[in-house]
Amino acid sequence: MTIMVPRKHGDASDGMVGGRLSRFEGNLKVTGAATYALEYPTEGVVHAVLVQSTIAAGKVVAVDISRASAMPGVLLVLTPEDDLGLRAAGDWAGTAPKDEAYYPLPRNVQFNGQSIAAVIAESREQAAEAARLITVSYEETASVKDLEDPAAGEGKMMGNLTVGWGDAEAALAASDVTIEAEYRTPREYHVAMEPHGLIARWEGDQLTIWEPSQWSHGMARMYAEWFSLPLENVRIISPFIGGGFGSKGQPLAFGAVAVAAAKKLGRPVKLAVTRPQNFTSYGGRAATRQKIALGATKDGILQAIVHRGYSETSVYADYAEQTGAATPVLYKVENYSSEHRIVPVNTVTPGALRGPGKNPSSYGIESAMEELAYALGMDPLELRLKNYADHDYQSGKPWSTRRLREALTEGAAAFGWEKRSHEPRSMRDGNTLIGWGIGCGTFPVIRAPSEAMIRILKNGRVEVVSGSIDMGQGTYTILAQTASEALGVPVDQIDVLLGDSRLPGSAIAGGSMLAGSITGAVHKTAVAARDELIGLALSEAGSPFRDTGANTLSLAAGRVSLPRDDGPSLSLAELMTALGRDTLEIRRNTLSDDAQTAEDQRRAWTTMAKVMGPTMGEFSMHSWCAHFAEVRVDEDFGTVRVSRMVSAFDCGRLYNPKMVESQWRGGIIMGVGQALLEEGIVDARNGRTINNNVGDYLVPTNSDIPDLQVISVGVPDLNASALGGKGVGEVGIVGVAPAIANAVFHATGKRVRDLPITLEKLI
Ligand code: MCN
Ligand code: MOS
């Protein structure tokens, strides 16, 4: 467990909610002082290396381990022959586990790159060398390589994702102006700086796992279910994480293998997933296809949206990358129809990647809106403002807050949009074509209960304790700010402890739901701690306040005083000494009062059962943004550079604008990668991801990124969270790719409808 010592930057108000405090753990990370999961010294640790399938579908007939087993240092080889004794785990939603066995090294191969064997040896080098000597014979069967494969078919309709109102087909047919187009996105990957891996250690029936985790409690539950252990016997430790972006929210097959090996050997096992193995040990964003038809009147009033989407999933689990996630909430439209199908292919099951659903969805609708603007001969900004949704047409509910209009108008003003000339290819600088485009984005406000603990120590320091995590988004820092403000204690007197499933329960750091949830819990706990401390100071023998006759006290700048300022004034340390206390410990949660049983709490912290979606109350609640992109395209070579971006956001109140701005910029940078570079390429012969490394799977570098101007237009939204903030982490990427695609069209007159926009598609 790591205690964070905050350092203060700038003026005193930086430590309050809304201040621009720097990330506490950033310094530790860049200087190497932060301990990542695989860096924990564990005596007697041995090393596991995975062997993955080289076919897309079939059966493992035999695994020859004779040469591997004979290698020096090799302790154990696991293959589909070994029954590891695991049971199936329940899913995120909290559905009870199926009563069946779980095989993390299965005999049936369902995708290329599936783990089918593991070697455990005294050193990693010995294990890696032995792993190369394993030979596997397969009985290969027919497979579906990807969405392009003629064998892929039409997939299955996801009935729960069908959305409709009015009569979209009829209204489309009756519209003056229509456009119809198909948009495509490829497989995309998280590529977090810290690859996956873990150290697993058993002590009797107690299991400790050091593994980067976006959700320590949920992962602990799933490991407990796999190994038939009581939840309290499993501990996940994850104080520092080198990014997750959606990939680190649940335990994966390799984790089960490492834990099972540690149990068999009676020694701690370290398993580092190699970078190439990271491309198939968990799924990235699914490839998508979507057909969108828009109908409008001559003066640009939207009449109908008809939307048909597809995304790939695996052959063993249904995961929908919901192409219809943003389409129904962005515009005012009386006739709407959207459907989504998932197409099973032989891949690892895709997963959530920053802005899941909303991201490809906004690429579709925001590209289509610009195509409509050109069909109408109308400025794309004007078209968007003209069709501004005054409420949520899908749920029929009013928005809690929606400052998308301000995002569009203030973003446009900062960008200088009025200087745009509408015709494609009409703006240039010598041989360079210049284009401007807009893309709007949105992400729902997702709320979840959480728990927190505050400890006031005898030395006057305050600990904020939570099992939530910080993968770089700033949880440590905003929790110190939240506690500082509510308690009246300077931020440099506060230590935040996170990243351990033994600590108080928390929402997942996913779906942009953590900050709103956990600041709410910490705020509530800090207010209770303050009340408790003042109550004790007024009533306990030994306290100099007891006989002052005061009925309340003030706590400010870390000192407890009479409100009138004319009596005793004690620091926290002095007061704790006067009270004769070593610690004062307060724990609170944000579950409702009638849902406080142990079972309620277990479900709340280890499943998604108590998570609330954006329309589960009176209002429809979302974050919003508008991106304005400028691209420069070399007319001869077709190379595209993003030369300027202005993005305006409504994310409600910002707990820490400095971190919010870097969250937004981080999302925008990932969006630039999505628009111009990122594409998982599948070998049609064997279903293998070919570019499974950071040399060939391109993500943006600093030189690909211009200055990114970000603007906040939000106002506090107290329906969305206790402190008025909406989600920040995901919305930044949403809408970037269409803004760039639209700018490329404006520059070149060529509409590329499949990402990424590479030069060969432009020439
Ligand atoms: N914040 C704020 N004011 C708000 C909301 C948020 O100051 N109103 C700031 C805080 O610093 C907070 C951060 O923004 O810590 C993110 O808050 P939130 O939007 O609630 O997102 P979560 O804390 O739930 O984090 C998860 C989110 C997701 S889902 C992905 S994907 C993502 C992201 O955060 N992955 C990230 N940002 C990331 N940032 C880094 N560095 N690494 C990742 O892997
Ligand atoms: Mo974020 S993709 O929901 O972890």
Image (tube, grey):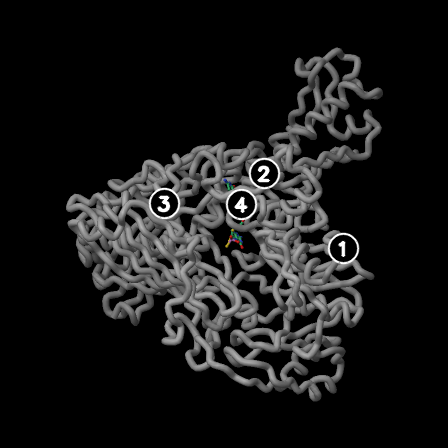
Q: Is there CB contact under 8 Å for labels 3 and 4? A: no
Q: Which type of secondary structure does the marked residue at label 4 adopt?
A: loop
Residue 461 place in picture, x, y as percent:
73, 36
Q: Residues within 10 Å of mark 4 (few under 14, many from 20)?
A: many
Q: Against 321, is 564 above or below?
A: above
Q: Nearer the viewer, mark 3 or mark 2?
A: 3
Of the residues shown, which amino acid type is indicated by label 4? Met
**Circle 1 is placed at which residue position?**
233
Mark 3 vs mark 2, CA separation in Å: 27 Å
Q: Is there CB contact under 8 Å for labels 1 and 3? A: no
Mark 4 close to ligand 1, CB under 8 Å: yes
Q: Against 460, is 4 above or below?
A: below
Residue at (38% x, 71% y) in the render: 153
**Circle 3 is placed at which residue position?**
329
**Circle 4 is placed at which residue position?**
513
Quadrant occupied by the C terminus? bottom left
Residue at (72% x, 50% y) in the render: 1
Q: Nearer the viewer, mark 2 or mark 1?
A: 1
Q: Is residue 392 left or right of residue 525?
A: left
Of the residues shown, which amino acid type is indicated by label 3? Val
420 or 620: which is nearer to us?
Answer: 620
